[in-house]
Amino acid sequence: MKVVLKNVTKIFPPRNKAESDFTAVNNFTFTVPDGKLIGLLGPSGCGKSTTLYMICGLQKVSGGQIYFGDDEVTDLSPENRGVGLVFQNYALYPHMTVKQNIMFPLQNLKGADKLSKKEMLERTYQAAKLVQIDELMGRKPSELSGGQQQRVAIARALAKMPSVLLLDEPLSNLDARLRLQTREEIRRIQRETGITTIFVTHDQEEAMSISDMIVVMKAGVIQQTGKPQEVYDDPTNLFVAKFLGTPPINVFNGRVKNDELYIGGKAVMDVPGVADQEVIVGIRPEGFIPTANGPLECDLNSVEVMGRDVSVVSTHADSVNPIIRAIVNADYKIDPSEKTVRYALKPHKVLLFNKTTEVRIPIPPAFDVAVTDTLLKRKNKTEG
Ligand code: ATP
């Protein structure tokens, strides 16, 4: 079932005279394709949960429409929307067994949806099997690990056979290892059931790893939507570029002059076709090539061994962040006792942004063929 949001807006009224209206979600327009898993992503307070609650009907919209398939559900009550919702605090009933917890919502189905005892048991066991807790049906929540409890919550949502599954930070209460494991589980369950799923998280890595598409939000407004890799490679603005990626993108103050990009007065890369201007330069950690004559010279702080790669920590007067982190292949053998490290740059890992609006400045496609070779040949050209 596809989910369509058209200009969905949520304005919270002021709670007292000193406050004014607060727009938590502003003109949200997006279609979640049938059977896909969408990661709704953004920093705390950007309106992710509010969007999710409007989709399930727990919050009324202030404007816009929501459709499930071709049917408008904007004014339907939550119980009539056929959604399954899993919260961060999975709130299982402590006095009930796993089986009773999963079956509980099925007992409340009314009218045409009412189920016989046999059907309820079938659905309960099917859902439990899917999340692999069918061995634990007799236990109480206090006798389960955090990950198992979370699976019960997911099974409880799945047993209703929802047309849409909504997950609000479902992994936040789990430790790092369990988080990783459970997110893979969610992906598997979603693939197996084919239920259209919206997954809210502030963790970009989590969203990128399991989503078919991501929606990045900031202050109630969609910044960009797309496949995770596409958004990572081709961010629309500095906010999105900074929000995606671990370690984060390195940001420098730079300048374009005569088709060349300068950082700290040194020409570091050709950017033919880009107008002369002050720019913000984003360089992904994997965009640095340690090179004896590389044009970008940084003060070396440390080299952290990561196994196959090393993380090279350095500083530069024009870096916006206190440190620059480059992830390079361990074969480069960087001597940590050196005072400086020099880099050539991988052109497709260097992103330019307007100094004022922070919107991405496209580098004309012809530039893609400007291979590293040219960069390696560049010998310390200084801004004239
Ligand atoms: P988090 O990741 O911290 O859960 P979020 O992106 O899910 O954040 P929301 O919970 O959707 O953010 O909240 C968006 C904004 O709306 C926040 O600034 C929040 O304070 C505000 N907000 C949420 N609910 C209400 C409410 N009932 N009344 C007034 N403001 C609200």
Image (cartoon, helix red, strand yellow):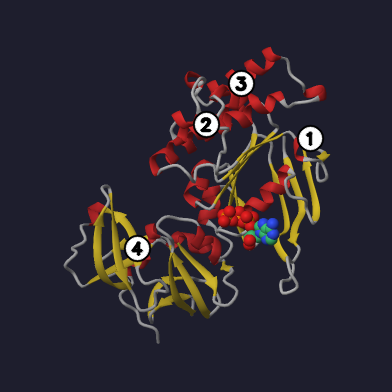
**Left or right of 38, for residue 75:** right
The reply to whether dot 1 and dot 2 touch (C-beta < 8 Å) is no
Going from N to C along the chain, the mark reached first, 2 or 3, is 3
**Residue 224 visible, this angle:** no
Quick check: which quadrant has ligand 1? bottom right
Q: Which residue is mark 2?
A: 151
Going from N to C along the chain, the mark reached first, 1 or 3, is 1
Which numbered circle lies on residue 124?
3
Mark 1–mark 3 Cα distance, whole angstroms, equals 20 Å
**Left or right of 132, for residue 345:** left
Q: Where's residue 299, x and y in %?
A: 27, 73
Q: Residues within 10 Å of mark 3 (few under 14, many from 20)?
A: many
> Amino acid type of disc 4?
Arg
Mark 1–mark 2 Cα distance, whole angstroms, equals 24 Å
Mark 4–mark 2 Cα distance, whole angstroms, equals 37 Å
Number of the front mark, 4 or 2: 2
- Residue at the spot 52% in from the left edge and 41% down from the top edge: 210
